[in-house]
Amino acid sequence: MRLTSKIMIGTLALFGGALLQVQPAHATVIKNSFLKTQRSITTYNSKKQVKVTIPKGTTVQVGGIKHVHGNKCVAINLERLSYNIRKPLLSQKKPGVYTHWLRAKGYNFKQIHKPVYLSYFAVQSDGKKSRNKIKTETGNLWKGDRLPANYTTASGTRFRVTSNGYLEYYAKSPFTFKVSPKPTASLKVVKASHPLASGETILAFKSKISGLSFVKKSHHDYHLTINSTGNGTITVIPSTTNVKKILTNWVYRIGKVDWYENNSVTNFK
């Protein structure tokens, strides 16, 4: 074989290998799976109300799948991204919280595993239905042990970790909202661990937020441990003698304080 042919074959092999490394396996890109942007993506929200930019290297969660002219496309849930990305949505009263359809190609995304910093909740179960029960796990943790019966008009203290790894804390937040407003405080997760069978998700940061039980390990090293208690509570609406809706909540503990996540709602006719 001529030397030039060998060089061309080798070059193509290397190029093909590199392409395969960033090209998502279409069959495994499904709703609620995770991707990382391979370039800065500027697009519109689903209702084409506002323009949004998702920076290169951003971890996103797939909110929907659609095939367009033989190409698999994804919609990204913008509400679950950090404030600097979702901010344009807040200019609209009733915004679409998903992006326009984006091609699930290697030049846009690389498929990744679920981030460790989201291990504290069933991140891929939201929206699943079973008879009259709907899963509602979004990673929002509220101070207390159960959702109040008047939650549609009430507010509470909450925090969450976004898909792209920001801890967002809200000193006072309505229980029902379309898009999360600017948080009271926000920190980027530096490192995370989830010891096997421990029920703990340990998050590391360079600083801390007042209102949450951080543990200082060293200078610029603060840990927040979200501990799943394995316990649950229920909220009956409007009352135990007139049941129209039952909501279930998982209880977590941070330090000595209880927090909960509403994980399902069952409607009764």
Image: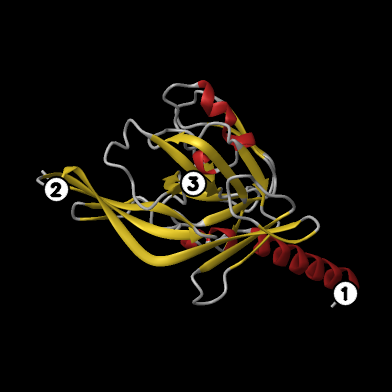
Q: CA distance from mark 3 to mark 2?
A: 42 Å
Residue 239 image label = none
The kind of residue on which mark 2 rests is Thr
Whole-percent x, y for residue 45 in the image: 51, 31
Q: Nearer the viewer, residue 93 or 64?
A: 93
Q: Distance from label 1 to label 3 (Cα)?
A: 45 Å
Name the outermost residue toward the front.
256
- Residue at 84% of width from left, 73% of height from top? 6
Q: Residues within 10 Å of mark 1 (few under 14, many from 20)?
A: few
Place of residue 8 in the rendered image (x, y in percent of width and height, measured from the top left): 82, 66
* Disc 3 crowd, CA 10 A, few/some/many (<14, 14-19, 20+): many
Q: Nearer the viewer, mark 2 or mark 1?
A: 2
Q: Is the C-beta separation of discs 2 and 1 under 8 Å? A: no
What kind of residue is marked 1? Arg
Closer to the chain start, of discs 2 and 1, is 1
For disc 3, the marked residue is 74
Location of the C terminus by quadrant is top left
**Image: 108 above or below 26:** above
Is 210 or 128 nearer to us in this picture? 210
The residue carrying mark 1 is 2
Q: Please name whichever residue, 57 or 202, is drawn nearer the observer in this view of the structure.
A: 202
